[in-house]
Amino acid sequence: MKIITLDDFIDTYFKILQRGKGFFFSKFTLNKEKRTKSAFNSTAFISSNFWSIPMVRKRWNSLISGDKDVDYIEYLIQTFLKNKSNLRLLSLGSGTSNDEIKLAKHTSIFKEVICIDIADNLLQIGAKKASEEKVGNIKFITKNIDKFEFKENEFVVGENWYLKHDYNLSTHPHSKGKVEGQIDFILLSKYGILIIEVKGGGLRVDDQDNYFSFNKANPGGYKTQNPFNQAKEYTHTLKELIDEGVFIYRAIVLPHEAGFQLRGPQLEGYKNLLFSKKDFENLKGGEDDKAINKLFYDFILNLAKTSRSKILRELNPSWSNEKINKKIFEKYPELSSKKIKSLKSQLFPAQSSYGYNPERINSEIILKENYETLKGLKRNRKVIIQGAPGTGKTVIAKKFLAENILMQQKGIYYCANKLIKSKIEHAIIRDYGIDNSLIKFKVYHENAINENVSNEIDFVIFDEAQEYFNKGLFELIEKFEQKMEHPKLLVLYDPKQTIIYNFSDISFYTDFYIENSFTHYLFDETYRCGQNKNIITISNNILHSKKTKEDKIKQEVVGKASDVAVKLIDKKKNKQLRFPFGKKKSLQRR
């Protein structure tokens, strides 16, 4: 057998003519990486590759799809991937990444496409094309795949997942000690919050929908709770507590039960929620542990999709499967790392590092008065409150601030002047020992818009805003909204104390904020003694009364005070009502 033939010399001659002497001599090296790179040292000869020949590509199409005119990429999408979503594609040796860009355009299917190649110049061509065609879910990495490190047994790469066993609902800051319940496992990830209810041993259900657990020690079984109802109740409870727009879903795990059947109307539609021994009973321990872990991981990923699609299908029965798959992560998007961090602080507060007493803050600030009003306000992320002195604006602001602090949220409190700033700061920081890294008190000024804004801020309060409505306040709010993810905003003002010359200007600002998605409330009941006319009248009567009429006045005063107290309480009860979805008729909502 000849090692070198005449054809080799002919081929070498034409390669030198085509690629130059540099290409020829680059092959005389023992470094295989350099030899490989030299094959792609110029992009001017891409058309010389056999896979660029039209007849070759048509043959590919025929062999794959059965039709020379049906592109194999389109065939792959329509035949195998059209009902998939949230996929990640890794392409090794992608070159100019033409096919990868085509795949990445199917954003409802591919969350991310990663292209790796040793030739940086080819990847630059691909990156330029992707930019021109506005394909944003694709990455280009210059790397020798022989040196590329894959993390073995690591399913979640570059993500943070948080799992807690035996999660007590009463530990959540919003529970206020009134919510009870023990969740077996709670998992926080970019897909939302997953509640996992686990039932060990065997499980069966009788004709009356009674559930029984059993094991070797107790083969007769004992009555237990319905795990599907448990998980459902915990889901609704947690939705009430979580102060974020986050997707919460559930799963039922039966690790020792392979024969449980989803029968009857009570269990219809729960198939996607159940992971049981039946899913892995053919696998053994040891080497198969990894396979079982992979099965459960895939179950969790698929559950994040099916739980979303089920809700969309119930709300939009006329939608096609294709439309539902496209809308799944538009309607219920994945969580950013910042949102995950915020939720982690709410769900798993590090109480040992508080440095302050949460129970005291709850009893003396949050729960003391008007807590129902605060609960109503929480339904809206952007609130503007109008009220005269003594109507409770600052009280609500303190409650709002304290509750966010207990969830370890970070915020800024803007005041109109140094005096107000010092007073509020003293009441919050010094009196209650709250960590000042969580809340910053600032005096508002016209150049506040030019200050650096941290994207770690979760809430902002603007007190006495009537003093600076016309000093760029709304521009600053817009900046916060652009920088942060759905920040909680609270604006407080009193039109009667404004320094703006024309009172009608305040009405303009009120209407403007309402038009820009703020929920407006009017606090019109005065609770502070110095501003309440009835209490002032009674006090003056006492102050200027003569001793000879003491008994008569005392009786008269007590009678009037009782009437006032009853009146205030009645009004208070009537006005502190909470309506679902932020639709409040109380407090003269506009």
Image (cartoon, rainbow, N blue to C red):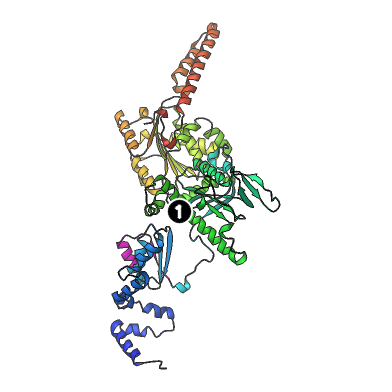
The answer to which quarter of the image holds residue 279 is: bottom right
x, y percent for residue 523: 42, 28
Q: Residue furthest right?
A: 217
Does the magenta run of residues contain 137? Answer: yes
Q: Which residue is mark 1?
A: 305
Q: Would you say residue 101 is visible in this rendering?
A: no
Q: Quadrant of the C terminus?
A: top left
Q: Residues within 10 Å of mark 1 (few under 14, many from 20)?
A: some
**Which residue is at the front of the view, 422 or 202?**
202
> Can see residue 481?
yes
Q: Nearer the viewer, residue 48 or 207?
A: 207
Q: Amino acid at mark 1?
A: Lys
Residue reaching furthest to the bottom? 1
In x, y percent, where is residue 289?
A: 59, 63
| Residue at the (56%, 64%) spot, across then down | 291
The residue sitting at 55% across, 8% down in the picture is 551
Instruction: Give the position of the N terminus as an image quadrant.
Output: bottom left
Q: What is the tally of numbered marks visible in this picture?
A: 1
The residue furthest front is 207
Give the SS element for disc 1: helix
- Location of residue 572 in the rendering, given as x and y in whole percent from the top left corner: 47, 25
Is residue 87 rendered magenta in the image? no
Viewer-nearest residue: 116 or 412? 116
Horizontal arrangement in the rendering, residue 80 relative to residue 262 (left or right): left
- Establish if 401 lies above or below 497: below
- The percent coordinates of residue 226 (x first, y second) are 58, 45
Q: Is residue 448 above or below residue 13?
A: above
- Quarter of the rendering containing residue 475: top left
Question: Who's the residue at 44% across and 35% down the image?
Answer: 580
Q: Nearer the viewer, residue 16 or 412?
A: 16
Which region of the structure is painted magenta? Answer: 126-143
